[in-house]
Amino acid sequence: MLTIERAMVDRIVAHARADHPDEACGVIAGALGSDRPTRFIPMVNAERSPTFYRFDSHEQLKVWREMDDRDEEPVVIYHSHTATEAYPSRTDISYAAEPNAHYVLVSTRDDDSTEFRSYRILDGEVTEEEVTVVESYV
């Protein structure tokens, strides 16, 4: 189960809406082993595509090194789908390389509502998980 603060959900959705019609992507880091997403890191979709995302390799290296220096890990890896449901594509599944991460997908295909879902992806196996949105972790 993913437990996430409403402010983080709002930031993910805002990033997805701002980058639409291209897919948006980013990470929410948290302390190693905490499973608590606390530091929002929007990233650039190097593909600038409405159907595919890829982290810029230089930016990703910088972000992952920064997480290492801060004793953090990627708790949430997120991206948006602009014309389809919030479900991982075959490409999304093949690129899922963080076994402990929650993979959040946001669909911006509907102007009036936003679909927000989370998955665990391990060895090509996709498992949807419950999302609990809290006002604060305290």
Image (spheres, rainbow, N blue to C red):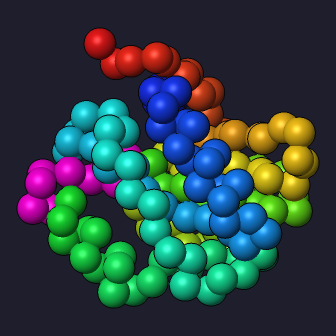
Q: Is residue 38 left or right of residue 53?
A: left
**96 versus 38 height, above or below:** below
Q: Is residue 102 visible?
A: yes
Q: Is residue 124 visible?
A: no
Residue, x 35% and y 54% (percent of image)?
Answer: 74
Q: Position of residue 33 (x, y in %)?
A: 23, 39
Q: Is residue 73 magenta?
A: yes
Q: Position of residue 65 (x, y in %)?
A: 19, 71
Q: Is residue 81 left or right of residue 32?
A: right
Q: Position of residue 72 (x, y in %)?
A: 20, 51
**78 versus 129 height, above or below:** below
Residue, x 50% and y 75% (percent of image)?
Answer: 44
Residue 112 lies in quadrant: top right
Q: Position of residue 69 (x, y in %)?
A: 9, 62
Q: Nearer the viewer, residue 121 or 28?
A: 28
Looking at the rendering, the stretch of residues picked out in magenta corresponds to: 68-75
Residue, x 55% and y 37% (percent of image)?
Answer: 9
Quarter of the image with the C terminus in it: top left
**79 versus 45 height, above or below:** above
Q: Is residue 58 left or right of residue 81?
A: left
Residue, x 78% and y 41% (percent of image)?
Answer: 114
Q: Nearer the viewer, residue 74 or 50?
A: 50
Q: Is residue 92 magenta?
A: no
